[in-house]
Image (cartoon, rainbow, N blue to C red):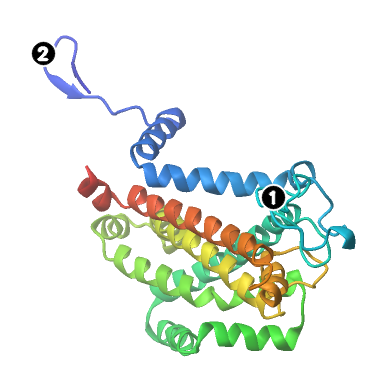
Amino acid sequence: MMEIAKGTGLRIDRAPNTGIRAKAAYVCKLLWRDKTGLAGLIIVLIVITAAVFAPFLSPYDPLQQDLRSAKTPPAWTEEGDMDHPLGTDNLGRDILSRIIYGTRVSLTVGFFGVLIACSIGMVIGLISGYVGGLTDNIVMGLVNMILALPYLVFVVFIAAILGRSLLIVILIFGFTDIPIFVRITRGEVLRIRESGYIEAARSIGAGNGRIIFRHILPNLIGPLITIATFEMSAMIFYEAGLGFLGLSVPPSVPSWGNMLSTGRQYLTIYPWIATYPGLAIVFTGLGMNLLGDWFRDVLDPRLRRIKR
């Protein structure tokens, strides 16, 4: 914004409003302009709402069995029942209720798995990229060795040894995903540490701690948020895959993977038992990928200029 300085007749630039409200309004404007990002946010909010308010939204207890109502088709079919909009499974459990409660398992695994991987991977990648030398060579050697392993086979092998537990599944995905965040962080640190403002900070006597926490770390937030969104979506798919193989949470816990595992036995006869949990997985993954794509566009100024 331009204004005239009093008594001088000179024009000076006034810095734009950079308060929290202005930034929030700017982000909302970008989100409104990107309809796919907005659709992704809406999908993610629906899933989060279902997980948080599951006891109030689900019409039945997800573990409640009613063998008299077993294998009831969805309500809109000829033999359907409005009491069970999406039908029931082989034990008479309401599929809609189990899908709603299944969001808790999927989001818990995705969120905490990414939190562990991002926290540890960021620290290791930051040290590796900033220190360099032998430290960097050792870290990247280990990272490349782990990434060379087939990921899903590696995860299945560990899960088969450690057993079925929600905590174990979170730890497996959290620790096996660390190398991805190490590589992303290290690459960004190598790029940032050669920037002009880093050289300027060193020239005025800034120490390593100040450079890392004041100049490098804030610039890592954008790329890490973007990759975390995509990895959370991937973890939801992988957890469902483990559940399908019988290696995720115990059978008594309602999860989308367990529902798929149950439904595959009746896929040709009672397809709704597996179809709707599968659609829930696709729906959630689509929303997170759309939201992650929007994050990438917003947090990368180069992509934002291209879209304009």
Q: Residue at x 50, y 87 (%)?
A: 150
> Considering the numbered disc 2 on the image, is that residue within a helix, a strand or a loop?
loop
Q: Amino acid type of disc 2?
A: Gly
Q: Residue at x 12, y 13 (%)?
A: 8
Q: Which mark is residue 51?
A: 1
> Considering the numbered disc 1 on the image, is that residue within a helix, a strand or a loop?
helix
Question: Which one is nearer the viewer's eye here, 193 or 276?
Answer: 276
Farthest residue in the front direction? Answer: 78
Name the quadrant containing residue 217. bottom left
Name the quadrant containing residue 91. bottom right
Q: CA distance from mark 1 to mark 2?
A: 61 Å
Farthest residue in the top direction? Answer: 7
| Labels in figure, total | 2
x, y percentage for residue 303?
Answer: 26, 52
x, y percentage for residue 101?
Answer: 74, 55
Q: In the rendered view, would you say 6 is above or below 145?
A: above
Residue highlighted by disc 2? 9
